[in-house]
Amino acid sequence: MEIGLEFLGSDNKTAIEYFDQAILLGQKVNYKKGLASAYNARGRAEAAMGNFQESILNFQEALKYFHEINDLTGEANILSNLGSIYFMTGNSSRALELHFESLKISEEIDNKLRIGTSLNNIGTVYQKNSSNLIEALTFFKKSLEVFQGIDHTPGIATSAMNIGEIYYKELKYDSAIYFHQLALELCDGTIDATFPLTQLGEINGEMGNFQKAFGFHRRSLEISERLDAKFDLTQGLLGLAKTQRKRGDFEAAILTLERAKLLAIETDAKDELVDVYLNLAEIEAITGDYKAAYENEINAKGVKEEIAKSSTDQMIRQLQFDFELDKKEAEIELLQKDTELKNAAVFNQRIIIFTSLGGLLMFVIISISLYRNNLSKQKANRLLQIQKEEIHVQRENVESAFEQLKSAQAQLIQSEKMASLGELTAGIAHEIQNPLNFVNNFSEVSSEMIVEIQEARTKKQDRIDVELENEILRDVKRNLEKITFHGKRADAIVKGMLEHSRKSSGEKVPTDLNNLSDEFLRLSYHGMLAKDKTFTGVFKTNFDPDLPKVNVIPQDIGRVLLNIINNAFQAVNNSEFIIQNSELKPLVTVSTKNLGDKIEISIGDNGPGIPDSIKDKIFQPFFTTKPTGQGTGLGLSLSYDIIKSYGGEIDVVSVVGEGSEFKISLPIS
């Protein structure tokens, strides 16, 4: 675990390998705290690599273990991490919901650091929408107050510069200068200082203090260039260009903006790129270059169309209301519980009194009864003894029958296990045999080549064929690379098999399948974009608004949705199919429908489709049509097992050349 943390941020793939080893060890000894920390670290590594869906799945596992060991600080931290991931993927409403949950737990345990962090995160989500700047300012100020109370320097600096930015947007320059100066005093010389320096430069430029303004810009650019922070350098150049434009130095401003444009394109900073194009268009219009101004206006419009827009005003207000309502309901619930406890105490006292009176009355009745029946006591005792003996015999018979039943049941279960094990062993042997054959063959060939080199070197020095030795060594190296490739392929098959056999330990909860489907659709889409920047596919949803909640384990159904949606995106991204159908826009559609006694989730694509000859095989373990090394064929098999465990069904309808549609049905009850 500690070794993995050393690689986190610099070599995330290596870090994940160590985290996986830590998870395996934690599972062997059932060390839940270690598992929670390992899944948390793995989630951070996946997020840094752009694998947002894997990141969230790992964070959810960490949250489950922190909850089981009642580590509220860990729960608050994970909820905050999840909120940040959803915010990065554009789901502001979900991000806000998670940050409020984190804040609620942090307030319960009175963790000031986590309270300040949650308040600042909530303010950041509010700040994204210009109509919620007042709410954002309120939370940033609360965050600043908390951080100042515990003298937490990084938190004070972050909150102060966020407050300064809002005052800058509202043109309240004096207040903006005050808070940016406060932040700068705490973080000057670090990468965090570039933002307040840039805004201080812009503010002084607006106020006409150009000498002071350029001093701030120069310091910001020096820090960004020294630390090779290209995104911060882009923002710094934008600020400098605005000040140059304000002073009337249009030629210098255009040169600065051109440099910022190249950096924005390189770092994929779309918001900054729009700002660059608009500033270029305005300056070129002022200088009379209307053609260039028009072109840059078109460029800005094109980038804007790439940026996803969604209005979250109503959802934000509703979530804030829900948060306050939850707090009030919790207070009411505490009062109700206190009242119930008091009423229960009074009721218990009454029960004790009545029980005592009843016991006394019963004693009197029993005494009279014993007195009146004293003559028949011996006869009753004999009858009782006979009944005891009969009961003893019956009990022995029942116990014997029960032991026989357990033995038969154990034999049946063992027979079923052995049958399943035989089928699984045959599949595993078939899948692993090929890569093992490659490993054995290349190992034997490499050994023979090394023997050839050894024999050649026993010859006299003037007869050694150096070129032949080099060629043999190159062949040995290629063979070792092939051995490594096929070894990793076998490893992937084994890991997939273990994943296929792993049982979920989560709890079933009422779940909104519309939200769950939308969540994993977007995660899969962003994951595809992160791995393939050239991907041009789109998605569409058609959710039934009257869908009732279903009692499921969200992680299980999420894994099913992720497997099938990932397959759909990979299908529409088939390069050969795209070339043959160049006019076709790759599309994945996810829809839900209430069928009365069950719910249907449909996942469709307009990809190449599934041939009838293999349609009956796609849910079999280890069956895959992907190239060797790119898939183990366990994804759909695992999904099929999960849906069946809920009493549901999963079917596929596909037409070659037109696309495929997977239909998942789950019972509502």
Image (cartoon, grey):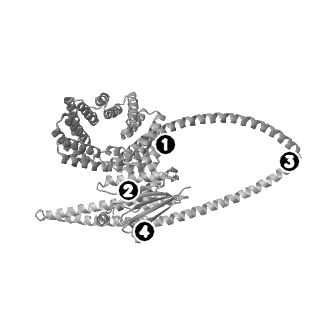
- Residue 343 visible? The answer is yes
Nearer the observer, disc 1 or disc 3? 1
- In the rendered image, residue 71, in percent from the top left (x then y), is placed at 47, 40
- Give the camera-side residue of 652 and 633: 652
355 to 455, vertically: above or below:
above
Residue ID for mark 2: 539
Residue at horizontal 35%, vertical 61%?
A: 572
> For mark 4, what is the residue?
615
| Quadrant in which the N terminus is drawn | top left
- What is the CA distance from the residue labelled 4 to the residue labelled 2? 24 Å
- As drawn, is 448 to the left or to the right of 371? left
Camera-nearest residue between 202 and 397: 202
Mark 2 in CB contact with mark 1 (< 8 angstroms): no
Type of amino acid at the residue the image marks with label 4: Lys
Dot label at residue 69:
1
Neighbor class of circle 2 (other Cα within 10 Å; few <14, some 14-19, many 20+) is some
Q: Which residue occupies the extreme bottom position in the image?
A: 613
